[in-house]
């Protein structure tokens, strides 16, 4: 398969913001790159709002997000019809897609139920991994048989993916070149399902990227390590792995990555100030 397209030669990309606050310059830069790559390949771009976290994802942020994306010059070609306009897909409305993927992982034995809380993991690990900063799951429940009676009771537990310890997960990033992360050393058994009945970020992204036929994932460099985990999910579910293109993060003047606290570089604030986004992006 040619890099970044499917068997029919089509390119399908997506932008996938999480509406936990207002978008900033860094998001605009990554999303515009995703748009350029889709346009250059005469492909399709999809907007997917990743609003699974009910507490942190506020409705008002999704509304302002769409206005801000439009102001930044973004346009997408596919999504549910909203009054004749192309709407975003919302992960909060796609529970069935995630449950199907989670059930497939249970059926093929690549996940296990886990009783450890975040605190348990923190307490049993002496120090986070020095380069990735990850807390590597110590394997407490890996081989432990934990019973459950029904899908309902199974859904009220944490489930982790059992990583192939010692295996190097390699991929070629379209922007950053060859990448390699070692399972069990750079990252450990990771959550796919949470006991509040929700998929983890890793599972939701892979299940949705598969369901939407995404052929290339363009996103921020902060998710590079997640790509290794997601490749394991693709492999386990038997799906074709997409191309990856990770964009450098925009930093502030002190070298820290932009966050929602950088109000002055928020798209809303820039729009209200009548800022020239193109000029700002060319220097950032
Ligand atoms: N929703 C994620 C974020 O805002 C991005 C997910 C992805 O592109 O895979 O960080």
Image: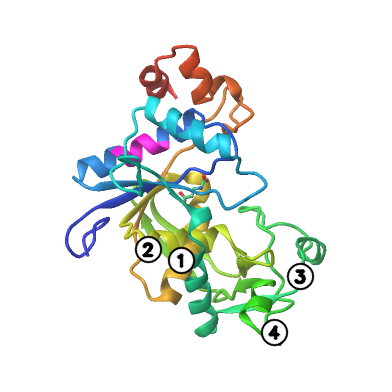
Density class for disc 4 (Cα within 10 Å; few <14, some 14-19, many ≥20) is few
Q: Is residue 238 left or right of residue 163?
A: left
Q: Nearer the viewer, mark 4 or mark 3?
A: 4
Density class for disc 3 (Cα within 10 Å; few <14, some 14-19, many ≥20) is some
Per the rendering, the mark at residue 211 is 2
Do the residues bearing badges 2 and 1 touch, measured as CB atoms within 8 Å? Answer: yes
Q: Quadrant of residue 259?
A: top right
Residue appearing at x 44%, y 14% in the figure:
275
Do the residues bearing badges 4 and 2 touch, measured as CB atoms within 8 Å? Answer: no
Q: CA distance from mark 1 to mark 4?
A: 22 Å
Q: CA distance from mark 1 to mark 3?
A: 26 Å
Label located before the other in sequence (1 or 4)? 1
Secondary structure found at label 1: helix
Image height check: is 122 above or below 277? below
Residue 257 place in picture, x, y as percent: 57, 34
Q: How is the image coloured?
A: rainbow
Density class for disc 1 (Cα within 10 Å; few <14, some 14-19, many ≥20) is some
Q: Which residues are magenta?
A: 30-35
Label located before the other in sequence (1 or 3)? 1
What's the magenta bit mostly, secondary-structure-wise?
helix
Residue picked out by circle 1: 97
Q: CA distance from mark 2 to mark 1?
A: 8 Å
Residue 161 place in picture, x, y as percent: 58, 73
């Amino acid at each position: 398969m040619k890099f970044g397209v499917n068997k029919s030669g089509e390119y399908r990309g997506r932008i996938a913001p999480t509406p936990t606050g207002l978008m900033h310059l860094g998001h605009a830069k990554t999303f515009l790159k995703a748009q350029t790559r889709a346009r250059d390949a005469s492909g399709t771009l999809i907007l997917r709002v990743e609003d699974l976290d009910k507490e942190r994802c506020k409705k008002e942020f999704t509304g302002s997000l769409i206005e801000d994306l439009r102001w930044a010059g973004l346009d997408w070609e596919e999504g549910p019809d909203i009054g004749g306009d192309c709407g975003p897909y919302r992960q909060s409305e796609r529970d069935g897609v995630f449950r199907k993927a989670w059930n497939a992982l249970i059926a093929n034995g690549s996940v296990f139920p886990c009783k450890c809380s975040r605190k348990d993991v923190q307490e049993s690990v002496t120090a986070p991994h020095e380069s990735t900063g990850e807390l590597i799951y110590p394997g407490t429940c890996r081989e432990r048989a934990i019973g459950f009676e029904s899908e309902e009771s199974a859904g009220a537990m944490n489930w982790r993916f059992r990583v192939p310890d010692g295996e190097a997960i390699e991929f070629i990033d379209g922007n950053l070149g060859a990448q390699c992360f070692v399972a069990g050393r750079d990252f450990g058994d990771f959550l796919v399902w949470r006991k509040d009945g929700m998929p983890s970020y890793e599972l939701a992204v892979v299940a949705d990227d598969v369901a939407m036929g995404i052929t290339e994932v363009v996103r921020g460099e902060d998710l590079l390590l997640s790509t290794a985990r997601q490749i394991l999910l693709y492999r386990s579910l038997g799906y074709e792995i997409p191309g990856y293109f990770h964009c450098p993060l925009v930093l502030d003047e002190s070298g820290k990555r932009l966050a929602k606290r950088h109000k002055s570089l928020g798209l809303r604030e820039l729009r209200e100030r009548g800022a020239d986004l193109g000029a700002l992006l060319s220097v950032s």
